[in-house]
Image (spheres, rainbow, N blue to C red):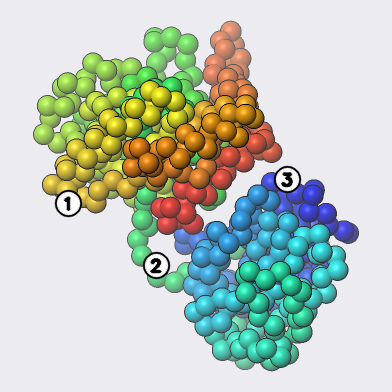
Amino acid sequence: MTFNPNNCRNESEVESKLIVSYLLPKLGYTPDTWHQEIAFGNIRLDFLSFATQVIPIVVETDSPMSVVMEAKHPKENLDRHLRKLHRYLTSLSIRYGLITNGKEIRIYARSADDIQLVFKCAGQDLETRIEEIIALIGRNTLKPIKNPDNLELEDSKINLVSPELVSEVAVQPDNSATAEPEPSQISEPEQIPENNPVKPQVKSDVTVPQKSQNTMKIIAVYHNKGGVGKTTTVVNLAAALSKKGNRVLVIDLDSQANTTFATGLVKFEDEEQDDLKDNNILQVLQSEEFFSIAEVARKSNFCNPEIDVVPSHIDLMQYETELNQLDFSRMILIHKLEEVEDKYDIVLIDTPPSLNFYARVALIAADYLIIPSDLKPFANQGLINVKDFIKKVNVFKKQIRKKPLEVLGVLSCKISTNSKFVQYSLPKRREAIPKRYGFEIMDSVIYERDDLAKCAEQFQIVGNMEIADPISVLDFKPDSIASQEFEMLALEVLEKIGKN
């Protein structure tokens, strides 16, 4: 089988067409010696392969784990993911890491507490360079060694190159790594039937090192100007983060309940059938003792994997004054989120386009803030109000000994795809944000596209009723440009909040 990098249009195709169909077979790894989507605590590896298969998998310096393979989107810059690869190799004692976006293939080797580039080639050159890769990380080349930390990268065996170089690398097999392990070092391999079409499920058998408590990250998405793509950002970013292996909770704090609709929780036609009225974010905020996040949150099949959503309701409008007079009201969401901090990795809070109580509660509870903006005059002028609002919120956060809100940046959203606008006007508008308003501008841009509207308008017929059945753009059209934009946004967010 041959490989053509032009056939890889997204991350999924890099995984299936390059890693699964081409690399793993060429390197001699059979289905029983590699695993996909394997989790170690809060680390989730795309592919993990073994020179010698041992079950259960034990994470220690003498573990037999040999190669981790990470697939990225063809448009992704691999340099952005090296810190994460470094963490994988050093914390899990994995000897080699291969990272690729289809257009470029790199291999890094672990040396003590660092990693070094040992091979690099373009995807189009893979056919002519495959023997070098086999000599480096082929299954027959790698054998478990007594202590991978002592793996020496001698110039005579592996020519190290800097990430900036693209020149050819001559690689010879590391014959010093062929010593057989002592019997006490590994357990007996589990007998796996030949031609077994089902890969063994190893996740429950994994022994992981003691790790610190999960650090849940809370991100508010806020602008006091409406119509800037706030809800679209929240729901599709939630889907993209979920697909990256994160456990995601979405909280709708806007009385318009647009996020509640957009995640498919409104399954009724009129108020008589309303099953959200007595079990939504309003009850969470009204009660100190009852209506926990776990009780109120609902599963949403808006995307795959599913996310949890705390719905909103139109009733929030009439209770705002009452809630604002309660002593505990501004703190209640903080306390209730603390109760589920081990259940979720990321919480996204959709906020009302105002300077009201609900927006304040969201920003007080949040660690980070994303400010969606279409970069039009009124939205830009509104950033002055946003900046002042953040200052007031941070004064209160200081009083309760909570860290100030960290602004991830202004997200260019609902941007016209007109070529002249994109070429001439958009760069000027983006440059104006930090200069005029003091906010960073995020690298990601979400353009106004038909697919974003169509995926939100999906419905199903139940009896005589037409029920809204929206779907994320990443599930509606995984290969679309809109989907890729949210994948890139998710990667940028994860990088900025330290979850990459």
State the mark number for residue 351: none
Q: Is residue 23 left or right of residue 106?
A: right
Q: Secondary structure at mark 3?
A: loop
State the mark number for residue 401: 1
**Residue at screen point 18% across, 26% down:** 323
| Residue 136 x/y as whole percent | 73, 78
**Residue at screen point 42% across, 37% down:** 432
Pick the residue in front: 268 or 252: 252
Residue 250, image quadrant? top left
Residue 435, image quadrant? top left
| Residue 298 x/y as whole percent | 42, 33
Q: Amino acid at mark 2?
A: Lys
Q: Quadrant of the N terminus?
A: bottom right
Q: Is residue 65 above or below residue 182?
A: above
Q: Is residue 403 left or right of residue 268?
A: left
**Residue at screen point 24% across, 25% down:** 356
| Residue 163 x/y as whole percent | 62, 70
Q: Is residue 315 above or below residue 391?
A: above
Q: Residues within 10 Å of mark 2 (few under 14, many from 20)?
A: few
**Residue at screen point 61% across, 59% down:** 78
Q: Amino acid at mark 3?
A: Arg
Residue 56 visible? The answer is: yes
State the mark number for residue 9: 3
Please name which of the two marks, 2 or 3, marks the residue nearer to the observer.
Answer: 3
Measure the alpha-carbon separation of dots 2 and 1: 26 Å
Q: Is residue 430 left or right of residue 104?
A: left
Tag 1 or tag 3, which sits nearer the N-term?
Answer: 3
- Please, which residue is most extreme toward the right here? 1
Tag 1 or tag 2, which sits nearer the N-term?
Answer: 2
State the mark number for residue 211: 2
Residue 340 visible? The answer is: no
Pick the residue in front: 180 or 368: 368
